[in-house]
Amino acid sequence: MDVLLVDDSAAMQLALRRHFSAYPDLSVRAMADARKALTEARIRAFDLMLVDYHMPGMDGICFIRKVREIPHYAQVPIVMITSDVTDEIKQAALEAGATDFLAKRTRGVELTVRLRNFIRLASAVRRLEDRATWLAGEVERALRHTREREAEIIFRLALAVEYRDNDTGGHTLRVARYSQIMAAEMGLDPEFCRQLYLAAPLHDVGKVAVPDGILLKKGRLDENEFAVIRDHTVIGKRILGDSSGALIRLAAEIAEAHHEKWDGSGYPNGWAGEAIPLSARIVAVADVFDALTSERPYKEAMRFEEARERIRELAGSHFDPACVEAFLRRWDDIRAVTAAERGSDLYAMAHGTEPWERVPELLRELAEEPPPKAASRS
Ligand SMILES: [Fe+2]
């Protein structure tokens, strides 16, 4: 335990040091200059302070007030050494943060007992603070663990959905990354960008309820079959809706609205403009761009520059123009995401983006053992 003793009286310093010497684990720093002692207090983390009231340059009350401003000393016991001080001064010392008083004339057994009690108090405060620090670390660790598990479960669920009509698992990652890049470019809150990145993969979760005969059909779909496909938005909202978690609620709004169009001609609700949640407006651009540039059994992959121009043309009709502008401004980064995936290096694409660093093994398995190719409609 470290004790700081601030007193310009050599006799008082000597008397206190003599008593403290009975405690072998105690380290006492005795100083006569309050200003230098304040500097010392900022450098070292003392567990107990004894401070004289009458000192040249700075009185004890002023010293205590300044020490209490240092975060470490919020709870550390500070004892003011007094001689002939009024109750008003004592009151001011208490308000400045003094824990107790010690009269200069205290001697013998009484001084021994008082100092022992101060040491015990300081020791208890330190144990409590150590415990609080440890607990805060544990809470932080548990929270991080929970958030990682939540994100991983979402991603694995998205992969399960995607596995039904896609052969690599790459669509999920790409849509998430495109969305995150656009959101960041639009200057949105970093926490929103992170949540969008994690929630976007569930945009098509409602497809789990679409029968294989329709979802995997290679020929043209009739109007009834399209209606069933369109229902994946409503079903997605139903699967994810009413969650108490913000991340799942965000995923629900994306699942419901990612096929809405800026001009109101989309589905399922025909929402237009800013009535469509911003998250869904962003994911809509990412989802369509990825669908255009992906090879499917019934179509070739569109060239990237051609798909970029297609997205540009659809600004103001299908897409929110602000989202398209963000997409175009970050074209190099969008293209880099695609390039990483094109090199089959899904690990490189996911690497460094928590918490999916654990998922690439699964992605590799999916890439190595693709399911039978089948038609896909977003
Ligand atoms: Fe969809």
Image (cartoon, helix red, strand yellow):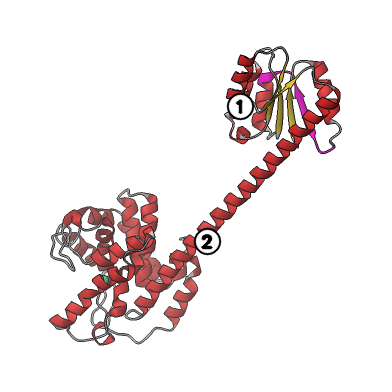
* First along the sequence among labels 2 and 1: 1
Dividing the picture into quarters, in which one does residue 344 lie?
A: bottom left
Callout 2: 10 Å neighbours few (<14), some, many (20+)? Answer: few
Tell me residue 256's x, y (percent).
Answer: 25, 66
Per the image, the residue denoted by label 1 is 97
Could you tell me the amino acid type at mark 2? His
Q: Relative to 276, is 288 above or below?
A: below
Distance, label 2 to label 1, CA atoms, is 39 Å
Q: Relative to 8, is 243 above or below?
A: below
Element under disc 2: helix
Per the image, the residue denoted by label 2 is 145
Tell me residue 208's x, y (percent).
Answer: 32, 78
**Residue at the image point whose x is 42% and y is 72% from the top:** 156
Ligand 1 within 8 Å, label 2 CB: no
Of the pair 222 and 309, the residue shown nearer to us: 222
Q: Is residue 169 visible?
A: no
Could you tell me the amino acid type at mark 1? Gly
Which segment did they paint magenta? 24-35
Q: Relative to 377, is 55 above or below?
A: above
**Residue at the image point whose x is 35% and y is 87% from the top:** 372
Tell me residue 273's x, y (percent).
Answer: 17, 56
**Residue at the image point whose x is 77% and y is 24% from the top:** 30
Residue 340 is covered by the magenta coloring: no
